[in-house]
Amino acid sequence: MIRTAALQLHVKPGDTVENFNKAAGCIREAAAKGADLIVLPELPITGYGLTEENYHSLAEAFSGSLITSFQELARELQTVLVVPFAEKYESRLFISAAIIERTGSLLSVYRKSFLWGNEKRIFSSGKKCYKPVETSLGKIGILICADAEFPEPSRLLALQGADLIVVPSVWSLEAESRWDIQLPARALDNTVFVMGVNTVHEGSCGKSKFVRPDGAVLKEAPRDGESLLIEDLDFTIIKNIRKAVPYLQDLPASFYNFPLIENNPEN
């Protein structure tokens, strides 16, 4: 059993000090409840919907003080963290997520590949490359918000052995029905666990959720309130569900005969 925690937060746009303190406090609370894996929503420190100038001022490199602080926290609490952040790389901005091992080591940085709406005017797209990250808890795939609206990224993660796909998001009230449809669909189509972690207020629909590999929603947070959502996930049930629902077994390998590109944060 892997105890996982989704931190559904109200993130105040531009208030990085308060947002960081809240996130760190919630991580400590989740760790005290035994969480092995803790996931924050999309852009939990800067907030969403700022100007390009604001993001250039607030964004950091993945080697900067923000991610270093979370690395220290992961090491202290002995928990795996998924920390989205506004990343500055050279002159470009990305919506990214750092995957941090319980030892504090930075395992990978994933950059959002499908930008939505006004994001395209501010941020650069990450490479459309989807590889799960090998952690001490199992193989974890990362998609950020709109990345999960396309079936192919989730399928590629599943084909490479992902046990769990986490989806940090700022998902809008207008798109709430898609959130409720697409996360269970990604889980069922690929017979993997899916964990959606959303924000609340500021136009977001909340409803962070854990979904089983058969598409059943295990637990869901409210639409309009902050929540520490904790669920124990048993990755060993994936094998049995795939026997009952053999989508991946029946899928011709020739459907995916194109090469996968390395997702290297140095590029």
Image: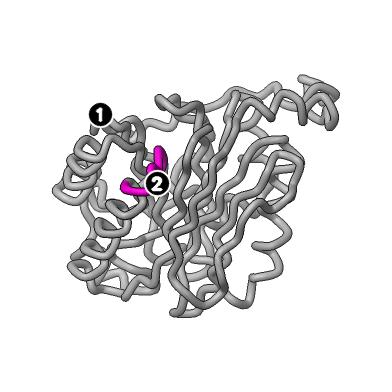
Query: What label does residue 183 carry, if any?
Result: none
User: Camera-side residue: 95 or 140?
Assistant: 140
x%, y% of residue 113? 50, 48
Q: Circle 1 sits on which residue?
A: 103
The residue identified by callout 2 is: 38
x%, y% of residue 89? 26, 47
Q: Which amino acid does label 1 sit on?
A: Thr
Q: Position of residue 100 (x, y in %)?
A: 32, 36
Residue 220 quadrant = bottom right
Instruction: Answer left or right for 262 relative to 157.
Output: left
How much space separates mark 2 and mark 1, taking CA atoms?
Answer: 14 Å
Residue 243's quadrant in the figure?
top right
Q: Which of marks 2 and 1 is nearer the N terminus?
A: 2
Q: Is residue 213 left or right of residue 168?
A: right
Looking at the image, the residue that sits furthest to the left is 65
Disc 1: CA contacts within 10 A as few (<14), some (14-19) or many (>=20): some
Question: Quarter of the image containing the C terminus?
Answer: top left
Residue at disc 2, secondary structure: strand
Residue 90 relative to residue 101: left or right: left
Q: Between 199 and 50, which is closer to the camera in this rendering? A: 199
Residue 82, above or below 58: above
Q: Where is residue 39 drawn, in percent x and y?
A: 41, 49
Residue at screen point 32% across, 75% down: 12
Instruction: Specify few, some or many for label 2: CA neighbours under 10 Å numbering under 14, 14-19, or 20 or more.
Output: many
Residue drawn at (60%, 30%) of the image: 235
Q: Does the magenta stretch include residue 34?
A: yes
Q: SS of the residue at dot 1? A: loop
Magenta region: 32-38
Q: Does the magenta stretch include residue 167?
A: no
The residue at the point 21 percent across, 63 percent down is: 21
Amino acid identity at mark 2: Ile
Q: In this view, does 57 lie above or below 260?
A: below
